[in-house]
């Protein structure tokens, strides 16, 4: 399988990473049985891959972070990859229609949505109003109570 290797400097928490135009493409084999989210690749040793920290596997349409290589007999290298789910599923994530309850950037939240992270205190407010005139037996009165238990 063909794998493209890149050097990127974007933070791992960024969805829309900047993928450079320059890359190295190598033929790789899957080493042993592996998971598509964390594949282990076997390939011929190449010292130029030492500076590469990102990869794209076109057969799977997924992006990966590259861990430092394990080198065997100076001829073969093994690379452990871990999927970058933010970049791999970027279009789906950016096209989501959702309500943001709390943001990590500034810690502010939507106070209309209770997410259990903020506290609201409720103090009883008792208000007494006197009738402007005394109660009249010929009239009907309605007593309204808001809140309470």
Image: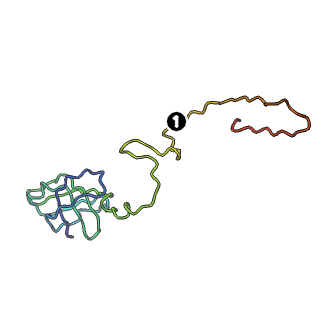
The picture quadrant where one finds residue 75 is bottom left
> x%, y% of residue 13?
30, 51
Q: SS class of the residue under badge 1? A: loop
Relative depth, front residue between 131 and 115: 131
> x%, y% of residue 31?
23, 62
> x%, y% of residue 4?
18, 65
Q: Is residue 32 left or right of residue 124?
A: left
> x%, y% of residue 142?
81, 40
Rendered image coloring scheme: rainbow
Above or below, 120 relative to 42: above
| Residue receiving disc 1 | 119
Badge 1: residue crowd in 10 Å (few <14, some 14–19, many ≥20): few
Q: Which residue: 27% across, 71% down?
A: 59
Q: Is residue 104 left or right of residue 142?
A: left
Q: Residue furthest front?
A: 133
Relative depth, front residue between 60 and 42: 60
Q: Which residue: 38% across, 64% down?
A: 92
Q: Is residue 50 left or right of residue 137?
A: left
Relative depth, front residue between 117 and 45: 117
Where is the C terminus found, in terms of image quarters? top right
Above or below, 95 relative to 13: below
């Amino acid at each position: 399988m063909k794998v493209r290797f890149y050097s990127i400097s974007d933070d791992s928490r960024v969805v829309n990473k900047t993928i450079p135009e320059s890359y190295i493409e190598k033929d790789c084999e899957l080493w042993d049985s592996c998971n598509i989210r964390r594949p282990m690749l076997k390939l011929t040793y190449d010292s130029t891959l030492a500076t590469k920290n990102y990869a794209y596997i076109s057969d799977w349409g997924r992006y990966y972070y590259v861990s430092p290589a394990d080198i065997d007999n100076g001829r073969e290298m093994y690379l452990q990859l871990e999927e970058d789910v933010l970049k791999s599923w970027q279009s789906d994530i950016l096209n989501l229609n959702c309500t943001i309850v709390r943001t990590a950037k500034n810690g502010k939240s939507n106070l209309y949505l209770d997410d259990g992270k903020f506290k609201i205190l409720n103090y009883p407010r008792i208000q007494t109003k006197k009738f402007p005139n005394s109660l009249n037996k010929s009239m009907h009165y309605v007593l309204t109570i808001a809140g309470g238990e």
